[in-house]
Amino acid sequence: MPMLTIDGRTVPAREGATILEAAQAAGIAIPTLCHHPALEPWGGCRLCLVDVTRADWDGWSKVVVSCLATADDGLIVDTQSKRVLATRRVAADLLLARCPDTAFVQQLAATFGITESSYQRADEPTDCILCGLCTRVCESFATSAISTQYRGTGKSVGTFAGQPPEDCVGCGACALVCPTGHISGERRPEGYTIWDREFHTAVCKVTASRCLGCGSCEEACPFSVPRVVLRAGGSQVATIPSEHCRGCGACVGACPSGAIDQHNNSHRALAEVLVAEPRGRQAGPSVAIIACGRAKVDPHALPTRHALLDVPCSGRVSLPLLLASLASGHDGVVVLGRHEQTCRLRGAEEPVRGVTDRARLALRMLGLCRDRVTFLSPPPGLDGPQRALDQMVAGLASLPATPLGFRGPAELPSGEGMDATLALLRHLSEQCLERQDIQSNGEVWLEAHGLPMPTPGGPVLFAGELPYLEVAGGGLFRPLQLAEVLRKAVALLARLGVAGVGVAVGGCGTLSPRDVKALADAPAVWTLGGPDQQLLTTMRLRVATIDGLITDRGADLDRPRVPTKVACDGSAQAMALLAALGYEAVDLGIDPLPDSFSLSPEHRNLATVRLQAAQQAGAQVLMVAEPRALARWALLTRDGAWRLSSVVPLMAHQLAGLAGVDLASSAVAIRRALASPPSLLEDRA
């Protein structure tokens, strides 16, 4: 690492860094106007000049532009020498003559003791200091819609013939980097105006009859626009004021019930654009491209087998949209972002990176190559998006053609939300089963969560749909983490004498021949009940449930230290389980929620009544029968949502591990007992 001396301080610098970067990293201020960390250095303002010398130069030194000069080892830098300050003063004096009424320039000149310029005042004062930031950021990360024009004293920044630029996409990058406010964009309820062009906002709207009030939209929006309102009577619903919505669409993919849609960017409209050509009509990989408007991909330069979808912001991309693109027959899907730090919708890209990571993990679990889905942030330059796209397509060319047959939009599960995501995962899993050379690979999920894998001749806990629930939900179910449900099941089996249990993950609601054989060869197969038990029974596999084991041998487990009530559905199975565990049952009647995540406000109200009844009866826990039901109830009691009770949903085997926790007094204690390290979904490296 190069070491240099700046103003008497020894400062390290990364290899290839400039003097300005090294100084800024060390907290040493050097004034600059035309520099931006995302752009190539230009050296136009001349304010960042510094004096440099070396020990062997015999006192000789020279003035260099610090944003262009490399921070070489052994360099001695003086940022405050007399000739440096004199040169900076001249630059500030000239700027004040050009922009005498600009507050930013006045403040800069005042730091050098200048209140009136010694040069002739400009005939037509302006706020533009010709720093070049706006034109360079537009060329590097947008569409080169603006440029400098004319020469000499008449030089300015503008558009061709002073007309609204056709190539402008309204990203606002030029306004963001302009230090003086000369370029400004105006955001109004109906849209955003810049360079005399108006860009209508693709407003997001909540369908109140489908909203759960879970708060996921609040968390997803980078601008904190959605609000969950708690109304009289306890009902709650999210609202997105149209006058404040920026149109990034991040909330659409985050909504578990599919209650949010975006103007002109509905799932159906986008999915129809991304449908692949039938396989027999194309040669080479087929790619669905979802591009931020700033990427400016030329559709005429793309092969006809590719499908291009321009969206106002890549934040609109959701897990169902990515999966539907693959299910329609494409070999891959690429999401093109475009340097969100210089976009007025900054912050909307980060959720999409997480969505892409989850899609890549789901593909690996299904047995498909994760590289079929990619998020790309193209390099600078007008050709950056095309170069990034070409690289991705070249990588797909080395993969076998997708095993998924052509499916039109009408044949695919449609819509947003958890139900659509799970339906698409099941559809993809069924398609993969038709190919003998593709096997599900749930081991990647087990490895990410540190769960034990099956060993030959050892007992197996069949995870079934639970891993896909966790991948599809992301952070929806916190603080209850679905991976911990399996971990506690393995621990309980070990305590009851079933040692060496490994966790097996099949397809999403399906099993491959290899899965069936592996489970058939296991000496014992355990499940958490529900659909997983039905699937294995249909495959004529011998299966036992953990609930059944608890009912038979619950007396071998620790008993609650104090009398504790647990709410349940009143079924004979639930009553037997709680009796075996030593808890007192509170019969609330059958579960009022349907077997889906498309829950309505009426369902939410029914759930709230149930939770309040449990709490009034003295229960802090609601026992549920299987993982999907646990996920639904966890969604309704999640962190970040309005909760009118503190009751925690749990499965019976989780209760078995909480005998030492005072469940009667504190839901916080329950949540702490269930806490665990976060799951490792990220695979960007």
Image (cartoon, rainbow, N blue to C red):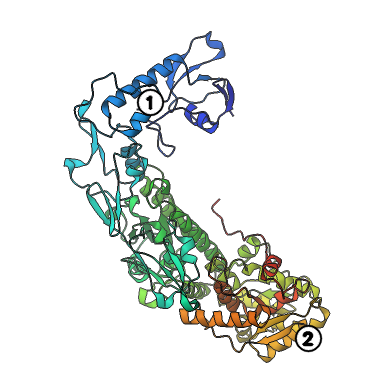
Instruction: Determine the CA span between mark 2 and mark 1.
Output: 84 Å
On residue 230, the disc is: none
Q: Which residue is mark 2?
A: 552
Q: Amino acid at mark 2?
A: Asp
Q: Earlier in the sequence, mark 2 or mark 1?
A: 1
Q: Position of residue 48 (x, y in %)?
A: 42, 25
Q: Position of residue 260 (x, y in %)?
A: 40, 70
Q: Position of residue 406 (x, y in %)?
A: 39, 72
One can see residue 299 in this view: yes
Name the outermost residue toward the right.
Answer: 556
- Along the horizontal axis of the image, is 588 left or right of 208? right
Name the outermost residue toward the top.
Answer: 58
Q: Residues within 10 Å of mark 2 (few under 14, many from 20)?
A: few
For the point 71% across and 88% down, the residue is 575
Q: Which residue is mark 1?
A: 110
The residue closer to the viewer here, 148 or 106, is 106
- Along the horizontal axis of the image, is 520 left or right of 419? right
Q: Quadrant of the N terminus?
A: top right
Q: Position of residue 86 (x, y in %)?
A: 39, 16
Q: Could you tell me how many numbered marks the image carries?
A: 2
For the point 36% across and 59% down, the residue is 244
Q: Amino acid at mark 1?
A: Ala
Name the outermost residue toward the left.
Answer: 161
Vertical arrangement, residue 383 with respect to residue 120, above or below:
below
* Image quadrant assignment for residue 553: bottom right
